[in-house]
Image (tube, coloured by chain):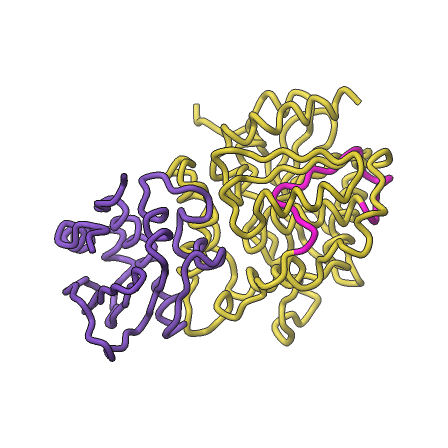
Amino acid sequence: MARHDAAVGRYVYLTINDVEYRVYYESNGTGIPLICQHTAGAHGFQWRHLLEDPDVTRDYRVIAWDLPFHGKSLPPIGDAHWTKPYNLTRDFFLKFITGFAKALELDKPVFIGCSMGGQVAVDLAAHHPDEFRAVIGVEASLNSPGYYLDQFYHPRISNEAKPATMYGLCAPTSPEPNIRETIFGYSQGAPMVFKGDLYYYSVEYDATPYVDSIDTTRCPLYLLTGEYDFATGPEDTRRLAERIKGSKFIEMKDNGHFPMSENPRKFREYLLPILQEIAAG
Amino acid sequence: MAYFNQQAFMDAVNRDGEFLISARFLDGSMKLHFDEDALMLHFREGRLTRIDRPSMFETATVVIKGPAASWREFLQPVPRPFFHDMFAAIVRRAFEWSGDAETFFAYYGAFRRMFQLMREHATNQE
């Protein structure tokens, strides 16, 4: 009898701004939907440990997708995407997440996202507070300028450069095999995708003008950041948390920018109490 | 200047599988500034062939500058946050880099591994 993981993969069709996308996602568990957003230039593999964690899937239906252009979600057939630069916009990102939840008829899901997913957690809390039971921003901040860099998409620099620089975003105390798996994901992306995702992360995203309007009584907001994350350090998330009344911030020891994949055992120590608190209502 | 054991470091670099893969085709040099002191690392066909003190006007493909205090933090066995990786430390302004951007980024994987080996052969871990 072959050994299988419990997560099962499927494709769903979503139409966003008149373009149809075939979107891959994996899911496991029953209960409250917990939808998971990967980091820039990566794909849903980063959540595989959460998808297989019985202490999570007992109460949560965990769903992790690959954004279009990432992983197994190919670029759309009905759009000449090769004729224009790939840039992830806030408009598309928010429509994708809310559209995905609607398409799967998810009842007030919990959203968790890391890095650009952490930033979009803040955007969801600000712009779609009533559609989510709670949001969890991992490695989130008020803004993150300065990372929309040409070296991340340059014909003379190969896809080896991305994993090499991502290595330094991991904690030196994270398990080496997990770090290697995390950065391997960065060698898999199509050449333009990482930089294009950073358009949202580093150019469009800036919560400063509206952060004070976030109402955590409508949408509870949790913030988790790894101590070794040099892109969005704990002090950056603390500054964000200080602006949002009722938000809860925890600095994670022995973790960097990719806690769910670089040190999943340590990450769950911080995440499980949050998920229990949300489930308890 | 004895931040690391130079011979042991060079031997380790040239027998390290990860470095040898990621440094393939690398020709060039890296100058490391430790306060007022400097070392030049010479690479040829993906190997670290020589370490010496550069002359005053000798240029390098890539230059990394940092104060002694930054190097001491960087070379700790388990460095504190933002000293754990050269790219991280540069972003956080503990070090400065200059030189050829293509070489620096294309070979960052090799340089990253090299610095990890330098840490393993550090001599100033007081």
**In the image, what residue occupies the spot 80% across and 38% down?**
A245
Query: Chain A colour?
Result: yellow
What span is in magenta? A126-143
Q: Position of residue A64 (x, y in %)?
A: 63, 40
Residue that sits furthest to the bottom in the current view: B57
* Rendered position, A185 above or below A272: below
Specify whether B11 is left or right of B120. left
Name the tint of chain B in the rendering: purple
For the N terminus of chain A, the image quarter is: top left
Q: Splitting the image into 4 quarters, where does residue A50 fall? A: top right
Camera-side residue of A208 and A22: A208
Instruction: Identify which residue is drawn at 36% across, 46% down.
Output: B73
Position of the C terminus of chain A by quadrant: top right
Whether residue A137 appears in magenta in the rendering, the answer is yes
Does A124 sit above or below residue B68?
Answer: above
Tell me what residue is drawn at x 45 percent, y 53 percent.
Answer: B88
Quadrant of the rendered image containing residue A235: top right
Residue B124 quadrant: top left
Q: Is residue B111 magenta?
A: no
Residue A126 is situated, as x and y percent measured from the top left of the image, at 81, 47
Instruction: Give the answer, above or below, for where A267 lies relative to A180.
Output: above
Is residue A182 found left or right of A69 in the rendered image? Answer: left
Q: Nearer the viewer, residue A84 or A254?
A: A254
Residue B36 drawn at (x, y percent): 29, 65
Q: Is residue A184 visible?
A: no
Instruction: Using the image as rendered, state which of residue A275 and residue B125 is in the foreground.
Output: B125
Relative to A128, is B31 on the left or the right? left
Is residue A8 visible to us here? yes
In this view of the protein, which residue sits in the foreground, A186 or A224? A224
| Residue at 17% across, 50% down | B5
